[in-house]
């Protein structure tokens, strides 16, 4: 077998965990960004439906204003 010193094993283990965590973070971040681009949390149709459920018929201007105000806080 390969004799390995304990301190070297611990250092390599810590480095491997750090590198794996960093790679995992950026991979998950990229995946989540693509997911949000394909499936935005709120769109115009959802805003119209919410306003209809509240008993209002929204104008195009109102829908655009709400969407703009929501996009402002991204």
Image (cartoon, rainbow, N blue to C red):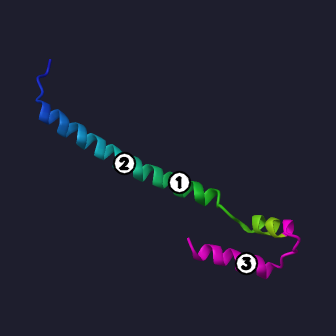
Residue 55 falls inside the magenta stretch:
yes
Q: Quadrant of residue 69?
A: bottom right
Labelled pair 3, 1 in contact (Cβ < 8 Å): no
Compared across the picture, whether 65 is left or right of 72 comes to right
Q: Quadrant of residue 9?
A: top left
Residue 68 falls inside the magenta stretch:
yes
Compared across the picture, whether 55 is left or right of 3 comes to right
Instruction: Determine the CA span between mark 1 and mark 2.
Output: 14 Å
Question: Secondary structure beneath disc 1?
Answer: helix
Instruction: Determine the CA span between mark 2 and mark 3.
Output: 39 Å
Compared across the picture, whether 52 is left or right of 63 comes to right
| Along the viewing direction, whichever of 2 and 6 lies nearer the viewer | 6
Q: Which residue is at 89% across, 71% downward?
A: 55
Residue highlighted by disc 2 = 23
The vertical placement of 63 against 33, above or below, is: below
Could you say where residue 68 lies in the image, as x and y percent from the top left?
66, 78
Question: Secondary structure beneath disc 2?
Answer: helix
Could you say where residue 32 lies in the image, as x and y percent from the top left?
53, 54
Q: Earlier in the sequence, mark 1 or mark 2?
A: 2
Q: Residues within 10 Å of mark 3 (few under 14, many from 20)?
A: few
Residue highlighted by disc 1 = 32
Q: Quadrant of residue 39?
A: bottom right
Residue highlighted by disc 3 = 64
| Along the viewing direction, whichever of 59 and 50 lies nearer the viewer | 50
Furthest toward the top, the residue is: 1
Q: Earlier in the sequence, mark 2 or mark 3?
A: 2
The vertical placement of 22 against 63, above or below, is: above
Could you say where residue 8 lies in the image, as x and y percent from the top left?
14, 35
């Amino acid at each position: 077998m390969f004799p390995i010193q304990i301190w070297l094993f611990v250092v390599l283990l810590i480095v491997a965990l750090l590198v794996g965590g960093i790679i995992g973070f950026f991979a998950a971040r990229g995946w989540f960004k693509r997911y949000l681009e394909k499936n935005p949390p709120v769109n115009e149709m959802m805003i119209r439906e919410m306003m209809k459920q509240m008993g209002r018929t929204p104008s195009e201007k109102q829908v655009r204003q709400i969407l703009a105000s929501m996009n402002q806080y991204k």
